[in-house]
Image (spheres, rainbow, N blue to C red):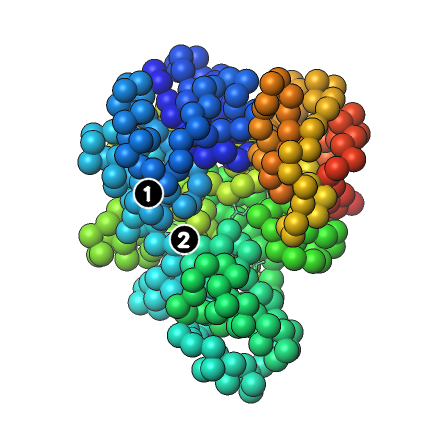
Amino acid sequence: MKVGIIGSGGREHAICEKLNISGKINKIFCFPGNAGTKEIAENVNLDLDDFKSIKNFILEKKIDIIIVGPEKPLVEGLVDYLEEFKIKVFGPNKIASQLEGSKIFTKKLCEKYKIPTAKFEIFKNREDAKQFCENCDYPKVIKANNIASGKGVYICNNNNDAKIAITEIFDGKFGKAKSIIIEEFLKGEEMSFFTIHDGIAFKNFSTAQDHKRVLEGDKGKNTGGMGAYSPSRLISEGLQQKIITKIIQPTLKGLYEMGSVYKGFLYTGLMIVNNEPYLIEYNVRMGDPECQTILPRLKTDLIDIILACCDKKLNQLKIEWLNKKSLCIVLCSNGYPDKFKKNVEIVGLENIKINQNNFLYHAGTINKNNKVYAVGGRVLNFVSISGEFDQAKKNIISNLNKLNWNDGFYRKDIGYKVIK
Ligand code: AMP
Ligand code: GLY
């Protein structure tokens, strides 16, 4: 079987590695992939906005199934487009992808189906937004409506913070902004809850806890994710049941009543307040770095799960997990999430210990003339699975020390809530 993966991050490299051990796949293509995927797949350098060239390549190479990693092509309707040409694709369609593509779409769905979420107001111009912020209570959370990979979100402690957020968003810092959301700040603990869907049935796909802020102690700017652990320390049977009945099932019902269904991974970002789940956001894909953190714990063959989803047979499959804890630390370029140098060589990758419990997933890297260069903000993901989180972390730190890359940094406190 031939499989194609759309994307170039750590998430896509982790998916690629998992498929590579399946035994059922003889060729993997990555569009466009990175230096890590290049080791096991053919990297295809096509513009991801150019759906037609992607489709032509898939048909020409007779690729059996396409897995879409990132949100942008999903929100732009790549799945709908490829399916018109009878190509098998794993990922949600354009309507369902609005769950991530438009925060207002999701907030309105929450309102209609009484899904618990932070109270909110929507503003279409900066004057009204600023006026509202003059007299409101703080903290407030101000968000750009369009996708901004977690970066268009401001936690505002006073009117001055709010003014800056409103100005930056309407000035187009995260792309053209027609509206913004101002919401109530929820005080609790975050959790990422994953499910996998075939359009009819869905199954749990584990939980994780990301660390989104760039600095230790959860300080500094928001990033795409600096590290994660799985499973979340908060999950229990009772909480899981509440998430499914109060949040996921009403969402699927809402989509169904709009004439759509959900196929693919669904990432439910939650704030847990006194053991009650509140929806913060949906992502219509696996998380990054949550994917890298979760997949090493998966026992069932990933391609069997994905094929079952495309064939609407997920109900017939049991998804099994290793009874282990997983931790991931992201090595970033100095300066991230602001300006950082590109094309910095990374030497010594061969020193890193990789085996059935220790993994290295590339993110912003490219391979030029057999040398590896950092080209992105998040560069490498170090993952380890173990009986205990603290042992997993020790394994990762040992590998990070072996690399000792001076042009990068990482958060040393990943997993602090589960490690003493
Ligand atoms: P989002 O892109 O909507 O997930 O927001 C990014 C991050 O901002 C989340 O992971 C939370 O840490 C934080 N956040 C977003 N909305 C809220 C909220 N209503 N209350 C508290 N924190 C929030
Ligand atoms: N790690 C957060 C995300 O993938 O959106």
Amino acid type of the residue tagged 1 in the rendering: Pro
For ligand 1, give the image quadrant.
bottom right
Is residue 208 visible to the viewer in this orientation of the structure?
yes
Q: CA distance from mark 2 to mark 1?
A: 11 Å
Disc 1 residue crowd, few under 14, some 14–19, many 20+, Cα 10 Å: many
Picture residue at 70% right of the left edge, 18% below the top: 350
Q: Earlier in the sequence, mark 2 or mark 1?
A: 1
Tag 2 residue: 100
The x, y position of residue 242, in whole percent, is 44, 55
Is residue 290 shown above or below 60? below
Amino acid type of the residue tagged 2 in the rendering: Glu
Quarter of the image where the C terminus is located: top right
Decide which of 33, 394 is in the foreground and name it. 33
Tag 1 residue: 92
Quarter of the image where the N terminus is located: top left
Number of residue marks: 2
SS class, disc 1: loop
Taking the image as shown, residue 257 lies to the left or right of residue 347, namely left
Q: Quadrant of residue 247?
A: bottom left
**Is ligand 2 within 8 Å of the beta carbon of the residue shown at mark 1?**
no
